[in-house]
Amino acid sequence: MIVHVLNGPNLNLLGQREPGLYGREGLEEVAARCRSLAASLGSEVDFRQSNHEGELVTWLHECGADVASGRSVGAVLNAGAYTHTSVALRDAIVGASVPVVEVHLTNVHAREEFRHHSHLSPVARGVVVGLGATGYELAIRALHDLARDHGPLEE
């Protein structure tokens, strides 16, 4: 079973960009944590990062196809700033029927006002905010548990 872990803009700078806010762990370390947990659950991780909205849309479509074929439990999505701006990502989640757990390293509700709104949360299975890289692990566990207990989400 595949767990897609998709990361949006500027997450390639994780560990370098504002470490007091985002932490010192780089994206490769986060990927290693995700792969280790997924392996313990009998899964593999498809871990990707892009600064381009359209590429994230395409990856969500691919994930939807994997979910429909029974190859994937869904996607962990840290869309970064696109969370607050992208109707296209929201529409890709719905259109491709992707079970998504939205993840944010920081507590977006304790930050600037413009970060308080998410276009993705209303169509996500769940949201994890403010727990750093541990949020990715919680999201992976949640997708596995949801798939086991409830099967694919029917909209």
Image: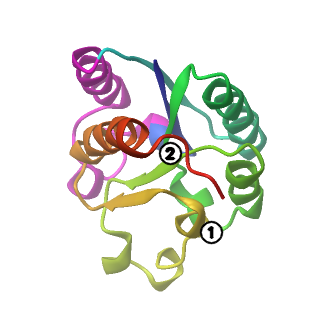
At x 47%, y 34%, the residue is 12
Q: Which of 38 and 19 is in front in this view?
A: 38
Where 92 falls versus 107 (above or below)?
Answer: above
Q: Position of residue 26 (x, y in %)?
A: 31, 31
Magenta segment, which residues? 12-41
At x 30%, y 30%, the residue is 30
* Residue 29 falls inside the magenta stretch: yes
Where 134 falls versus 29 (above or below)?
Answer: below
Q: Residues within 10 Å of mark 2 (few under 14, many from 20)?
A: many
Dot 1: element: loop
At x 67%, y 50%, the residue is 93
Q: Where is residue 82 in the image (x, y as percent from the top left)?
A: 62, 58
Report the residue marked by disc 2. Answer: 77
Q: Distance between the residues labelled 1 and 2?
A: 13 Å
Report the residue marked by disc 1. Answer: 119
Q: Nearer the viewer, residue 153 or 56?
A: 153
Q: Residue furthest front?
A: 150
Q: Residue furthest bottom?
A: 113
Q: Are marks 1 and 2 in contact (CB under 8 Å)?
A: no
Q: Nearer the viewer, residue 51 or 90?
A: 90
Dot 2: element: strand
Q: Find residue 91 and report its image quarter.
A: bottom right
Q: Where is residue 4 in the image (x, y as percent from the top left)?
A: 51, 29
Task: Name the amino acid, label 1.
Answer: His
The image quadrant where one finds the C terminus is bottom right
